[in-house]
Image (spheres, grey):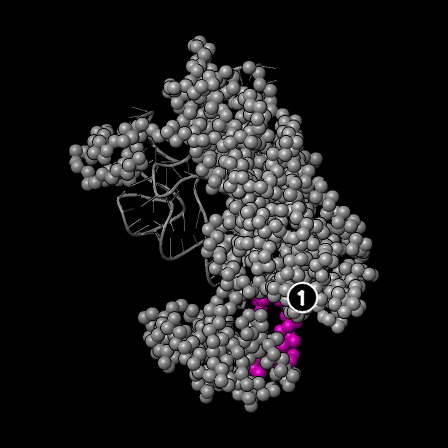
Amino acid sequence: MPIERYNAAEAEARWQKIWDERGIFATPNKLTRPKYYVLEMFPYPSGRIHMGHVRNYTMGDVVARVKRAMGFAVLHPMGWDAFGMPAENAAMERKVHPKKWTYENIDAMKKQLKSMGLSLDWSREIATCDPAYYKHQQKMFLDFLRSDLVERRKSKVNWDPVDQTVLANEQVIDGRGWRSGAVVEQRELTQWFFKITDYAQPLLDALDTLDRWPEKVRLMQKNWIGRSEGLLVRFELDRATTPAGESELEIFTTRPDTLFGARFVAVAPDHPLAAAAAKKNSALAEFIAECKRRGTAQAEIDTAEKLGFDTGIKAEHPFDKAWKLPVYVANFILMEYGTGAIFGCPAHDQRDLDFVNKYGLGNVPVVGPPGVDPKTFVIADTAYDGDGRMINSRFLDGMTIAEAKEEVARRLEKETADNRPVAKRQVNFRLRDWGISRQRYWGCPIPVIHCPTCGVVPVSAEDLPVTLPEDVAFDKPGNPLDRHPTWKHVKCPKCAGEATRETDTMDTFVDSSWYFDRFTDPWIKTAPTDLAVVDAWMPVDQYIGGIEHAILHLLYSRFFTRAMKKTDHVGLDEPFAGLFTQGMVVHETYRRANGDWAAPAEVKIESNGDVRHAKLIATGEPLEIGPIEKMSKSKRNTVDPDEIISTYGADVARWFMLSDSPPDRDVEWTERGVQGAWRFVQRLWRLVGEAAGVAGSAPAARPAQFLPPAAALRKAAHSALAKVTEDIEKLHFNVCVAHIYEFANALGAAIGDIEGDGRDGPSPSPDLRWAMDEAVNILVQLFAPMMPHLAEECWAALGHATLVAQAPWPQVEADLLVENTLTLPVQINGRKRADVTVPRDAGKAEIETAVMALDAVKRVLDGKTPKKVIIVPQRIVNVVA
RNA sequence: GCGGACGUGGCGAAAUGGUAGACGCAAGGGACUUAAAAUCCCUUGGGGGAAACCCUGUGCGGGUUCGAGUCCCGCCGUCCGCACCA
C-alpha cells in the first residue's frame, strides 16, 4: 500500500485554520469545570521570535493541551511586554516611532507564534503599551499611593549612562546595567519607590509555601531578601573629640558576642559623622572625596584596598566607659546597609583583620575553637569565623556564641543612656525598596502632577489614562517627555495654578507584575480586574519561563500581588502556584580564520568517521568548530525558527525541542537532531497508515477475549499511556518522548509480525484488529500535545470526524499492567545472577524455594545454606551467601 | 569569600535505595537498489571467552545498607547565584 509522505507545510496551515475558525482554544470565564491556568512568560516584541520562545511556548502548549484533554477549563493566554528601551533605540537609530515599531513587531511575532500551532486564547491578547492596559496600572499606582505603598524620596540610585536612566538594584548585574551592559554610576536623585521592603518578611516566609517552585529560585530569593538578625547598639562618643558635639553613634552588628574583641569603630564615607568631621579636617575631606571618586564597578571593588582615615573621634565601649575606640572613616563601609557604621572585631572578621593589620591596631581573639588553649590562641592573617567558646571576654567567658549573643543583647537592652536603651534587637534586610522611576519616553506615565504650591498632586481618576504624546523627537539623548513643548504643562488639579506633569515613566517590570491578572478579564474597562473573575482563575497553576527572572520579575510580581490585595484588586498573596524554569537553547559556534563568526545557515558540516569538519558554504573556507554556547546575535550561532518551520514544519521543531534534554537543562540545537525528529514524523505517519490498514474495519464491540498477540499490544499501549500521563504531569517531556518512541517501536513490530503472517496465513483475527485500532488511536493521542498538526492529520486518517485537540485523554486500563507471573531479578550478594519467574501472588516461601532451585544459586552456594534471603515483594530477591 | 546545583557509554540522556545505560543521535555491518536517498534488520560501556557465561564499570576516597548512580562524610572538577551586607 503506497503511503504518501506527510506534507507538513500544507497540513499545518490547514489545521491551524480549522482550530481558528472553530475557536476551540478560547476559554469562557463562566467556569463549569475545574480551572487550570497555564502561562508562559510573555515576550518582549523585539521583532522576531527566537528558539528560546519556541522551547518555552511548546512546553506550555503541551501542558495546556493535556490539561484540556483531561477535562480542565484551561486558561492559556498570550500578550506583549511592549514597553521598553529597544523601541526608543529603534526610534533613535531608524527614525521610526516606538509605537509603530512595537506594533509592527507584534504583528510579525504573532504571525510566527500562530505558525507554531499553539493552543492560545488570542481573544485575551493584551499589550502593555496599550492605554487600555496602562490606564489601570496608573489607577493602581494612585491606589498604592493612598495606601502608603509608594513613596517619593531622594536617594542614591544606579544610573545607567548609556540608557540614560535609573535602574533598580535587581537590574544591576555585576555592576552593569542589565540591558545596556554599561558600568553603572551612583547618582543622587528624587525617585518614586514601591515599598517592597514593607513586605520583606512576608515575602521571605511565603517562600516556604511555594512547594511547586524550584528550590533554586526560592533560595535565590531568600538570599536576595537577605534577612539577618542582630543588635543595634548606641556607642557613646567622647564629645571632646567630636566635630560638633555629637554624642553617640549607632552601629548594627550580627556578632554582638564579639564586642570584647573590638579594636575600632568605622563609618561609611558618606556617613553624616564623616561629613561633619570633614568640615574641620581638609585631609579627611580629601580622603572622602577620593573614596567617592573610586568607582563602584565590581572589578574596582574586588581589587580595592581597605582604606581608612582616623578621625580622631573616640567612641566608648558599651560595657566599659574607660575603653576608648578610635573612629575611622573606611571605604569598605556601606551607607546603605545597617546604619552605615560598624565596630571592627578583627580576630573574627577577615575584612576587619586586613584593616587592623594595615593600620597596626592589633587584635584580640574572643572565640576559641574547640580544643584550643585560650592563652596561646593567636590570630595572624586569617580571621577565625568558626564555632567555639568565648574567651578574653570577661562575663561572657565560657559561653557558646549563641549564649554570648543573647547575654550581650539582654544586658544592653536593660542599660539606658539618656533614658533610652543602649541597644535593641533588630532584623535587617538586604532587600531595598523598588525604585520605579525611569527617565524614558516609552513607558507607563506616572500619573502625578507637581505643583509649586500644592506639591505632589495625584491625577484624578477620571482623567486617566495619562497618555503618552505621540509627537516626540528622539534626536537628543535624555527623556523626550521632559523636552516636549506642551505635554508636561498642566493646571494643578487642586489649586488650578500652573503645574507640571511627572515626566518619569514606570519601570517596565511594573507592567509585567500584573499582566497575568489582567488576562483573566482583559475586557473590563472600569477596573484593573474583576475581583470575582480574577479570584476564580488565579493563581497561575503552571508558570513557565527563564531562570533569568528568578529574582527580578518573580519577586516584583509577588510584591505587586500583595499590594493589589491590599488595594482590593485581587484576593490572594501568591500569584504563581507552580513555577518551572526552562533551560536555554544552545548551539555550536563557527569561526573563520579572521575571527569572524559564521552562522549555522552558512555552514556545511562534513564528517568522516568520528571527526566533523565545518566549512563555509559560499567559499568552501574551512571553519573552526567552537564551543557550544547560548544562541546569541554576537556569536551568530542562532537558528531562525521561521526557517525551521518552513523547512520541516512546526511539529518537528516542537518535537525536537522536547526530545533531547530534560526541560530545565540547556538543549543543544543540532541539524542531526532536527532531522531525527523529521524522520520520526514521517515514520509515525507511515505507521498510522499501516496500522489503519491492518485494523481494517475493526469490530465495533470490544472482543470478550484477547489472544496473546493482541493482549501484548494492548499492554504496550496502556503501559505507554500510563507512563506518558505520569511524566507529563512532572513536565519530564524528554522521558515522554522516549516512551512514545518505545511504543511506536512496539507497534511497528506488531504490524511487522502480522504482515509476516499475512502473506501465507489468514488475515488478522478480530481481537487483534480491535487491539490494533485501540493502540494506534492511543499513539496519536499521546503525541498530539507535542505534534498537534500531525496528530489531527492522523486522527482524520483514522476516520474520526472530530478533532483530536478536543478528544478526552484516554483512560488507562490498570488491569492490563498487572502481570499474572512476575520475573524477579535474583541477586547473590547484591549482584544480579539470574531471574526467577513466579506467580504474582507467590508467597515468600514459594519464591525462596524457586530461587534456591536455580542453577546459578546452587553453583554459588555450593551446598551451603545462605546466611539470609531478602525478598522484596514484586521487586527483587537477594541471597546473602 | 558565602550559598547552591551538577559530574553516568563516542554524544544528548534514563533509572520510587532494588536487573545501570530505557529512548534518541552518531558509528559499524547487512538487506533492498544499476546507484544514491529513503526504508528495514543486526551490533555497539570496557576486558576475557568458541559459547554458556565470568570479571569490571555511574569524578576520586571513605561510610551506612542484604543491596548505593541514588543516602551520609571528605576531596577534585564544572556551572550558577550572591558578594566589602558588618
Which residue bears the numbered disc 1?
A191
Side of A270 where A97 appears, left or right: right
Q: Residue at x 78, y 62 (%)?
A: A488
Q: Residue A477 sits in which quadrant?
A: bottom right
Q: Residue at x 79, y 60 (%)?
A: A487
Q: Amino acid at mark 1?
A: Gln
Residue segment shown in magenta: A284-311
Q: Is residue A251 on the magenta stretch?
A: no
Side of A328 where A851 appears, left or right: left
Q: Residue at x 50, y 80 (%)?
A: A234
The quadrant the C terminus of chain A occupies is top left
**x and y, in percent, of residue A148 in the image:** 61, 66
**x and y, in percent, of residue A443 in the image:** 70, 55
Give whichever of A23, A641 is nearer the camera: A23
Query: Is residue A800 shown above or below A638?
Result: above
The quadrant the N terminus of chain A occupies is top right
Chain of the residue displaying label 1: A
